């Protein structure tokens, strides 16, 4: 900002110098410009060219940037005027002079078990390994009515069959009458020969904000017929002991 400062009225002789009074006298020596302002000479006057943060005839008045430019601070930050400038108080997740830079929360985050960290504003989330496997369910391998999941162990599909169906893709019809007979015979054989049947069932296996928590599949009490459930990393063992 330039504001002309007039000096007291002077005669032509006082305004100019030289043999023919052709040289303008420099009025800037002894000027009153402040705060780093630049003095620009005129004819019997001078102008104070103020820096952006000051205004007034001699650049002595502080500019309130917060009032002059309400949007100077970004992303919900609070603007505080200071002498010769301003300060932005950023909300959580933002940084920089005007709070326009998103803080990378993944730089100090820790995701476990092969999970990938994704930055958000003021937070992050861990994308578990299961989400990075090829979607084996995309081809609809399970029979209609079955629920398809991708195995976190090998990426293959797992079909959860509805009542009345069984098999890898739930296409085999269950003969409930035969199943009941086989179940009874199996229990009798186990009592006679002390067999131990172990079934490995693999689940997604991990949960938690950082995929650091092993799911205890035994919490759902999957064992029947006096079986013992042993939780494992990424699955559980169903062990049925004969007596």
Image (cartoon, helix red, strand yellow):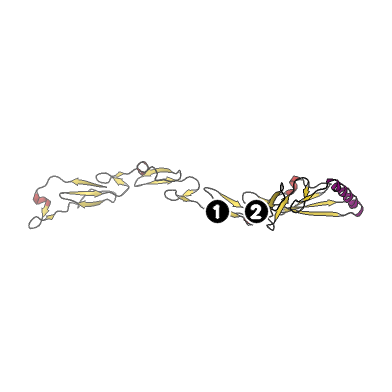
Nearest the eye: 84 or 90:
90
Magenta-drawn stretch contains 179: yes
Residue 175 placement, left or right of 207: right
The foreground one among 105 and 71 is 71
192 or 163, nearer to the observer: 163
Tell me the element at label 1.
Answer: helix
Q: Which residue is mark 2?
A: 138
Q: Main secondary structure of the magenta part?
A: helix
Answer with the quarter of the image where residue 6 lies.
top left
The disc, 2 or 1, on the residue closer to the chain's N-terminal end is 1
Q: Is residue 76 left or right of residue 13?
A: right
Asked which secondary structure carries label 2, the reply is helix
Residue 153 lies in the magenta-colored region: no
The CA distance from mark 2 to mark 1 is 30 Å
User: Is the residue marked by circle 2 packed among few (<14), some (14-19), or many (20+) residues within 10 Å?
Assistant: few
For residue 68, say whether it is visible. yes
* Figure label count: 2
- Residue 18 — which label? none
Which residues lie in the magenta part?
A: 176-194
Residue 181 x %, y %? 88, 48
State the mark number for residue 106.
Answer: 1
Residue 205 seen in render: no
Q: Residue 97 appears at what percent x and percent y? A: 42, 50
Residue pictured at 12% horizontal, 51% vertical: 15
For this orientation, the residue located farthest to the left is 20
Q: Are marks 2 and 1 in contact (CB under 8 Å)?
A: no
* 7 up-or-down from 115: above or below: above
Residue 233 located left or right of residue 122: right
């Amino acid at each position: 900002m330039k504001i002309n400062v007039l000096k007291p009225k002077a005669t032509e002789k006082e305004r100019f110098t030289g043999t023919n009074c052709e040289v303008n006298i420099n009025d800037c020596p002894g000027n009153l410009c402040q705060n780093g302002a630049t003095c620009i000479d005129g004819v019997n006057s001078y102008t104070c060219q103020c820096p952006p943060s000051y205004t007034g005839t001699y650049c002595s008045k502080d500019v309130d940037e917060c009032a002059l430019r309400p949007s100077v601070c970004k992303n919900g930050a609070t603007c505080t005027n200071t002498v010769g400038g301003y300060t932005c108080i950023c909300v959580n997740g933002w940084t920089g002079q005007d709070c326009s830079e998103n803080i990378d929360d993944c730089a100090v985050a820790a995701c476990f078990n092969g999970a990938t960290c994704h930055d958000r504003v003021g937070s992050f989330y861990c994308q578990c390994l299961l989400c990075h496997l090829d979607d084996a369910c995309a081809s609809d391998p399970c029979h209609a009515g079955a629920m398809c999941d991708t195995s976190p162990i090998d990426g293959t599909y797992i079909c959860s069959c509805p009542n009345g169906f069984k098999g890898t893709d739930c296409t085999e019809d269950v003969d409930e009458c035969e199943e009941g007979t086989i179940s009874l015979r199996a229990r009798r054989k186990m009592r006679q020969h002390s067999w131990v049947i172990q079934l490995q069932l693999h689940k997604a296996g991990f949960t938690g904000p950082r995929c650091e928590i092993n799911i205890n599949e035994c919490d759902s009490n999957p064992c029947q017929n006096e079986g013992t459930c042993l939780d494992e990393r990424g699955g559980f063992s169903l062990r049925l002991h004969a007596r």
